Amino acid sequence: MKKIIMIVFGLVLLLAAFLAGYFFRNTGCKVTQTPPSLPTAAVTASPTPLLTMTPTTAVQTELVFSNYNSAGVASQPTSPTVFTLAKPKIISHIQDYHWNSARGAQSGTIGLKSADGKTYGPWDAKGDPGQGGVPNAYWTVYPNIEIPAGTYTIIDSDPASWAHNGGTRGTGMSQVYAVK
C-alpha cells in the first residue's frame, strides 16, 4: 500500500510540474521582455509613443493574440490575420513567422490597420533564426505605442513567405504582446 501511495504521489508531482511549465510557456503570464533594440515607431495615425524604453528596460507584457501552433506550415496566407482588443493597449511587440520552406526571408516590415482604416506603422522588423537555424524565420517589431480598443489586421510586407496552416485557418502566424 505504501508503495502505491508513493507511486501516485510521484505521478501527481510530475503532472503538476508539467502543467506549471505548460502554463508559463503558453499563457503569456508575467512574461518579461527585454527588447534587444527598439526601432523608432513610424506611425501614420495620431498616437505617439507612450513608453520610452532602452535595451536594459524590463517590461512586463501579456500575450493579447496568438495563432501560433506546432503543425507543419505553408507560405502565403489565404486569409487576413485579425485580432480584437477590448480596451486600449500599449503594443510592446508583434512577431510574425516566416518559415518559407526552411529558407526564411529577409526581414521586412509589420504594421497594423484598424477596422476604420487607420494605419499604425509599418515598423522595420528584426529577423531571428527559427527551428533548425532557419535564417530570419521570426520577424519582430517593437512599436511601443498605445492603440485604441478595436479590431486590427496585421500587415506583413512579405505575405509570400509568411507562414500559415490549418490551425490558423489560413491566417498568417503572428503573436501580439501588450504592456501589462
Image (cartoon, rainbow, N blue to C red):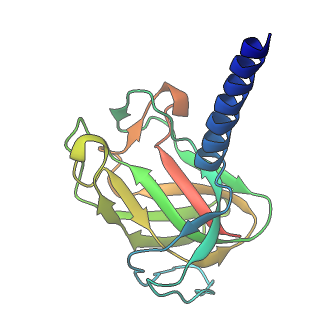
Q: Is residue 4 left or right of residue 133?
A: right
What residue is shown at x 75% (from left), y 70% (from top)? 88
User: Looking at the rendering, which quadrant does residue 45 occupy?
Assistant: bottom right
Horizontal and vertical percent for residue 154? 52, 56
Q: Position of residue 23 (x, y in %)?
A: 67, 44
Q: Residue furthest top?
A: 1
Give the tally of numbered discs: 0
Residue at 54 percent of width and 72 percent of height? 120
Residue 112 at x, y percent in the picture: 54, 63
Q: Is residue 52 above or below residue 111?
A: below
Between 73 and 2, the residue placed more toward the observer is: 2
Give the position of the C terminus as an image quadrant.
bottom right
Q: Is residue 86 something one can see in this rendering?
A: yes
Residue 171 position, x and y percent, is 50, 39
Q: Nearer the viewer, residue 5 or 109?
A: 5
**Front residue of 35 and 150:** 35
Residue occupying the point 46% across, 57% down = 95
View extreme (left): residue: 103
Q: Is residue 82 left or right of residue 72?
A: right
Residue 99 picture quarter: top left
Foreground residue, 91 or 80? 91
In the picture provided, is 61 more to the left or to the right than 112? right
Residue at point 63%, 67% (across, down): 61
